[in-house]
Image (spheres, rainbow, N blue to C red):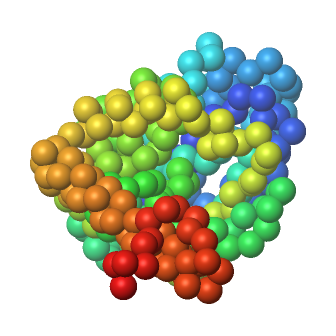
Amino acid sequence: MITKKVSIIVPCYNQAQYLSEALQSVLKQTYTNWECIIVNDGSPDDTATIANTWIIKDSRFKYLEKENGGLSAARNSGIAIADGEFILPLDADDRISTKYLELAVPEFERDPNLKLVYCKAEKFGDEYGNWVLPNFSLYNLSQNNLIFCSAIFRKQEWEIIGGYDEKMIYGWEDWEFWIAMLKNGGGVKKLEEVGFYYRVKSNSMLDKTKGLKSDYLSNYLSVKHADFFVEHYGSFKKMQQELEQNRNEYEYKLKSEKFAIDVFCSVFFGFSIFGKYKKSKL
């Protein structure tokens, strides 16, 4: 039986009210060779008090306190002191299923080329139901993130990449991390079982990543991983040409639709909406 240690990293900032629920899902794992590192990212709530109750309950829970530095920095701090060969990030307001580790870890033995294992997911909280994400491919990954944070990977991969990028201060840190890990090759396995539960909240970080923050992240990713995006979209000149072609096709279609509407209105109602149609053209 495979008994390689998994280090579960749980950053916490203003999520103390959910923390025990997340840690309970860790404690219930059928795969027992794990440690869980709770990273208090300078949280002003009672994260420390709650974390201490779990450390007393089970010695596999560990606690790290640091100054607030954001999600990427908190994960990096936890992973840096982790003993496990495998890493599983878990946000403090989410949960994992009891068999997630038991099902995921053996996949790395079956396929040495694997870099990442994840699973099906469900939402809970302000919204319930299956969280349907596109199937994994590098092309799909170039369009948007399609793997949640709680996937399992080797600590060695984190070391090779240089950790989570701490410049991703407004979000999208998972997307950047997966691109960095996978763009040069390596397998990805999606389990058919639901192993991850994502809490939906009305004020989630994903909802806040808009406007200037979104522009900053898009520009940063485009520069850092220009090789990846060019590989899947073509050269920037080609992208510009395709954009112009799509714009022209859209304008032509719009003009055609306006012309058809004008024909209909002129024939049946005797007036023109857009002023494009003249009977002499028929």
The quadrant of the rendering that contains the C terminus is bottom left
Q: Nearer the viewer, residue 269 or 173?
A: 269
The quadrant of the rendering that contains the N terminus is bottom left
Report if residue 212 is visible in the image: yes
Q: Is residue 71 above or below residue 226?
A: above
Residue 148 rendering spot, x and y as whole percentages? 53, 55
Residue lying at the far front in this picture: please name it. 280
The quadrant in which residue 13 appears is: top right
Residue name at image x 57 percent, y 24 percent = 70
Image side of residue 21 versus residue 133, left or right: right
Residue 250 rendering spot, x and y as whole percentages? 37, 63
Q: Nearer the viewer, residue 199 or 262?
A: 262
Residue 260 rendering spot, x and y as whole percentages? 47, 78
Residue name at image x 58 percent, y 65 percent = 273
Report if residue 115 is visible in the image: no
Residue 251 rendering spot, x and y as whole percentages? 36, 60
Residue name at image x 78 percent, y 35 percent = 15
Image side of residue 279 versus residue 239, left or right: right
